[in-house]
């Protein structure tokens, strides 16, 4: 190889090395996944919401959250709107209750299926501020003497039970004050069996359990009504579940807070949990 040829070869090699070096240093166009990761959303431009499989009435009507019908479906779309998403940009995925609150990556931006906010769960996932606080509800069956009750006074002469150590049990003692006292059970399942057998006339459970038991498990199950809050007690608070340390937690909480402050959350609750007459307030 002559000197001139060698010089040209070295020059070409040097230019190629510089080009490779510059290419390595130049910014690349981010992929959709990279952009989504930086924004905190599972998919850029979409809001991915998780719920149960199946999702039950009255939280989701006919197991179709995309309809926006049912309390939690309506809340989800209201939050989406607050975050700037159109209805067509909402994507629904399904998970079990336990999957949603387990540690690790998630395939949703937030999930809602009546998750009570607890310190223990906060170790594995984030919660938004609460979008709903449960009340205590009297349920019975169509053949029970409690089926015709329309007031607290109507319940006082009946046998009313609940799981011991619960807010439901406290509500019987402090709000209903039955003449026979509160009937004690170790679990809600025991209380339900006693109601089915006629051992008690009615039982008290929280609202989500009331809807589930009367709609799914009890033959001829009926909701008599909601009880006023017992003094010194609070109901379970439901929050939207997000992945642990999600960059969206503050935004989602701000959206929920805005809906609460505007009265929109109460409006949704009135539509799906009260206006239908499914759980009237007992006085």
Image: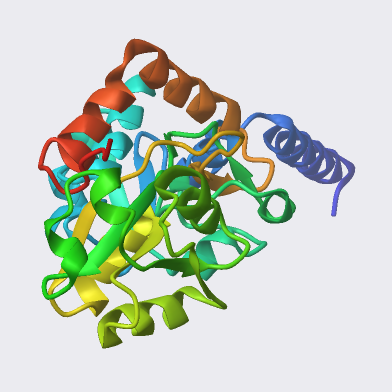
Q: Position of residue 171 (x, y in %)?
A: 48, 49
> Residue furthest toward the bottom?
197
Considering the image in quadrants, where does the N terminus appear?
Answer: bottom right
Q: Is residue 210 left or right of residue 177?
A: left
* Residue at x 48% of width, y 39% of height: 41
Q: Position of residue 229 (x, y in %)?
A: 46, 36
Q: Is residue 62 left or right of residue 93?
A: left
Residue 202 visible in this rendered orientation of the protein = yes
User: In the image, is residue 39 above or below residue 72?
Assistant: above
User: Residue 267 versus residue 24: which sits nearer the camera?
Assistant: 267
Counting every numbered tag in the picture gives 0
Q: Is residue 188 left or right of residue 28?
A: left
User: In the image, is residue 185 above or below residue 43?
Assistant: below
User: Residue 227 versus residue 122: which sits nearer the camera?
Assistant: 227
**Can you tell which quarter of the image residue 274 is in?**
top left
Q: Position of residue 178 (x, y in %)?
A: 41, 56
Q: Position of residue 259 (x, y in %)?
A: 37, 20
* Residue at x 27% of width, y 62% of height: 139
> Residue furthest toward the top?
262
* Residue at x 46% of width, y 73% of height: 188
Q: Is residue 209 left or right of residue 169?
A: left
Residue 55 visible in this rendered orientation of the protein = no
User: Residue 176 versus residue 21: which sits nearer the camera?
Assistant: 176
Considering the image in quadrants, where does the C terminus appear?
Answer: top left
**Can you tell which quarter of the image residue 223 is in?**
bottom left
* Residue at x 17% of width, y 46% of height: 150
């Amino acid at each position: 190889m002559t000197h001139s040829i060698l010089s040209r070869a070295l020059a070409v090699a040097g230019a190629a090395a510089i080009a490779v070096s510059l290419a390595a240093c130049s910014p690349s166009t981010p992929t959709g996944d990279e952009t989504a990761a930086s924004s905190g959303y599972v998919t850029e431009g979409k809001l991915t919401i998780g719920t149960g499989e199946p999702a039950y009435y009255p939280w989701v009507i006919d197991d179709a959250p995309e309809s926006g019908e049912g309390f939690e479906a309506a809340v989800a779309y209201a939050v989406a709107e607050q975050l700037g998403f159109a209805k067509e940009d909402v994507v629904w995925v399904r998970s079990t209750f336990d999957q949603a609150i387990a540690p690790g990556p998630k395939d949703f931006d937030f999930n809602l299926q009546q998750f009570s906010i607890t310190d223990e769960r906060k170790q594995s996932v984030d919660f938004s501020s609460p979008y709903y606080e449960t009340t205590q509800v009297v349920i019975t069956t169509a053949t029970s003497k409690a089926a015709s009750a329309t007031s607290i006074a109507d319940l006082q002469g009946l046998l009313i039970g609940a799981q011991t150590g619960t807010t439901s049990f406290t509500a019987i003692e402090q709000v209903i004050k039955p003449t026979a006292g509160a009937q004690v059970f170790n679990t809600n399942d025991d209380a339900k069996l006693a109601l089915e057998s006629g051992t008690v006339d009615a039982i008290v459970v929280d609202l989500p359990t009331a809807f589930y038991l009367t709609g799914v498990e009890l033959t001829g199950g009926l909701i008599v009504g909601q009880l006023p809050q017992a003094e010194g007690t609070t109901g379970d608070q439901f929050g939207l579940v997000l992945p642990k340390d999600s960059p969206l937690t503050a935004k989602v909480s701000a959206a929920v807070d805005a809906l609460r402050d505007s009265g929109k959350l109460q409006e949704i609750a009135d539509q799906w949990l009260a206006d239908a007459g499914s759980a009237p307030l007992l006085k």
